[in-house]
Image (tube, rainbow, N blue to C red):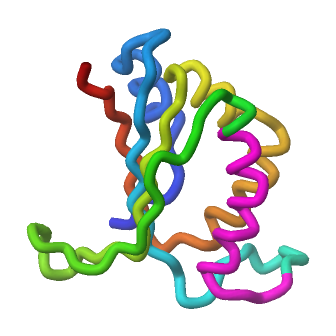
Amino acid sequence: MPSVNPSVEQLKRFAEQMPPGEPILMLNLLRFNHKAAYPIDSEQAPCSGTEAYARYSRTALRKVRAAGGEVQVAARAQFALIAPDQERWDEMLLVRYPSPEAFLAMLADEEYQAAAIHRTAALADSRLIGCTPRA
């Protein structure tokens, strides 16, 4: 089943289980829709999923930096060596944040939330995995 946006319950568990006040890494695995899937009543110009994600990224990257975060790695996914046959990803991002609180505050930002319509339209499936760096 595709997963694109976190549920309220998933966000709650994230807040409870990630170490407060500590740096975190968020691993993003992204698979794009061929054509962006905006809501029917949307006034967005038709585009590819990749272009819709670029629309989202223009705001998201600014908000990541404002939260004290930075993109550590951005790469095109080429081949899943160990994965189910049907699993494929187009891109991966590894983003560092100063804390889970900084990440959650970014998600709650009004401007970020407005831009998230582009992320939702862009993605056929995704994974967002909270990680802690090793010392």
Is residue 60 located in the magenta-colored stretch of the structure? yes
Q: How many marks?
A: 0
Q: Position of residue 41 (x, y in %)?
A: 84, 76
Quadrant in which the N terminus appears: bottom left
Q: Position of residue 60 (x, y in %)?
A: 70, 50
Determine the main secondary structure of the stretch shown in magenta. helix
Quadrant in which the C terminus appears: top left
Is 120 placed left or right of 9 in the picture?
right
Q: Position of residue 106 (x, y in %)?
A: 68, 33
Is residue 84 located in the magenta-colored stretch of the structure? no
In the rendered image of this protein, does residue 24 appear above or below residue 54?
Answer: above
Residue drawn at x 61%, y 73% as measured from the top left:
122
Answer with the quarter of the image where residue 37 lies. Answer: bottom right
In the rendered image of this protein, does residue 29 appear above or below residue 130?
Answer: below
For the record, the magenta segment spans: 45-64
Residue drawn at x 41%, y 62% as measured from the top left:
92
